[in-house]
Image: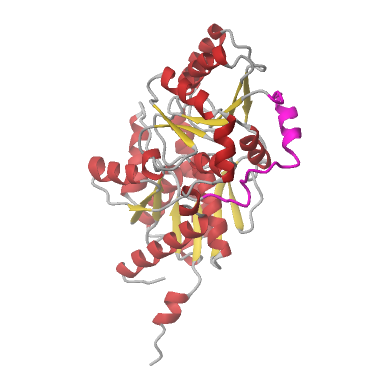
Amino acid sequence: MRDTSIERWSARLRIGLLTHSVNPRGGVVHTLELAKALHEAGHHVTVFAPAGPGQGLFRPVPHAVELMPLSLASGGLATRVGARIDDCVNHLRRRRPADSFDVLHAQDSISGNALAVLRDEGAIGGFTRTVHHLDTFDDPRLTAWQQRAFRAADQVLCVSRLWCDTLKREHQVEASLVANGVDRTRFSPGPGHGDDRVALSLGLRPGSPLFLAVGGIEERKNTRRVLAAFAEVRRSMPAAQLAIVGGATLLDHGDYVRAFDVDLAASGLVPGRDVVLTGAVPDADMPALFRLADALVMPSLREGFGLVVLEALASGTPVVVSRIAPFTEYLDAAEGGWLWSDPERSGSIASAMVRAADPARAASLRRSPPAVLDRYSWTASAARHVALYRAHHALAGHPC
């Protein structure tokens, strides 16, 4: 009798990766970078993402993409999330994914709930879920959906030890650690030929110290304290600018944004000149923004990993980060390129910003890139994912 076990274990996997948006949020970037690396390793990858009329992914990709049409739902956050779950379920029911994929992998709570519905219906055998971080909600429906998306999964992954430990301690869920990565061909010290164009288009002053914050105005990004810290920095660096980039999200940060606006009005800083709120920018412009910045400022109160930290370091840009996990997991105190800060104290953030913007620090970083960049690659991340997929399926009795 022919032994087909080697063939099964060496076969290229058919992988469906599901993400919650077509916009450049951290979890979506992780999904696309992982998908690209899996594709380059020879696996058959399809990314599923919800999209409204006329929407598409924020960057071109080399693998297959299926956009899941969104219905026009109005109302509060829970209503809109519920509608997105239903849209995802309806699309996948028609798609019959069990016939097309060896692995179905949800990167968020919306797609995780959709796959949980299909599993309960018997339409799929099970699914993998990556938890990037957990949020706190006032609405019990959102809390229940968040928990169901990982409790119903057959295999749970996290991008940091912090969240593996949190899931085990608070929810008795065992999760495996998977790494993020950084594309060092895309993010490099440069300079790039389009850097001046990007600076001009956003109103960034040539030669002035530039501090960059990525992720928009959110409480977990600690944006109000970043603003307060920048106001302190301006006392010694009066020509400095702060650029806050991004912010496309399904979540409602309206109260926090309004409080930020009050802070900005009271600070004496001029919007559009001293503090530049760019909103979403073209994905192709992000490498230039990292190179233009004198420092990335990321004193977050809560992160899944903080992909932009590696992207900034690969661009030769020093980073200000919180002295908390997950940053303390992968940034070795013996290496250079980053400054620790206490995220609860704007004075601590300001002090780190001034030190990070020292031109000698960036020059040293560009001469000697930190070893952390060698430890994290999307190729290694893809290999880790495939090993975990195969190990899980083997334990389940149907190796892929």
Residue 284 vertical position relative to residue 115 in the rendered view, above or below: above
| Between 276 and 71, the one nearer to me in the picture | 276
13 magenta-colored: no
Q: Residue at x 48, y 19 (%)?
A: 224
Percent x, y of residue 171: 25, 43
Question: Where the C terminus falls, by quadrant?
Answer: bottom left
Percent x, y of residue 150: 34, 47
The prevailing secondary structure element of the residues shown in magenta is loop
Question: Where the N terminus falls, by quadrant?
Answer: bottom left
193 magenta-colored: yes
Q: Residue furthest bottom?
A: 1
Residue 93 vertical position relative to residue 197 in the rendered view, above or below: below
- In the picture, measured across the screen, residue 3 lies left or right of residue 27, that is left
Percent x, y of residue 356: 52, 29
Q: Residue at x 34, y 35 (%)?
A: 143
First to last magenta residue range: 182-207
Residue 200 vertical position relative to residue 169 in the rendered view, above or below: above
Q: Is residue 228 visible?
A: yes
Residue 376 vertical position relative to residue 303 in the rendered view, above or below: below
| Between 95 and 381, the one nearer to me in the picture | 381
Q: Residue at x 45, y 53 (%)?
A: 375
Percent x, y of residue 299: 44, 29
Q: Residue at x 63, y 43 (%)?
A: 189
| Between 15 and 245, the one nearer to me in the picture | 245
- In the picture, measured across the screen, residue 247 lies left or right of residue 60, that is left
Q: Is residue 72 visible?
A: no
Q: How is the image coloured?
A: secondary structure
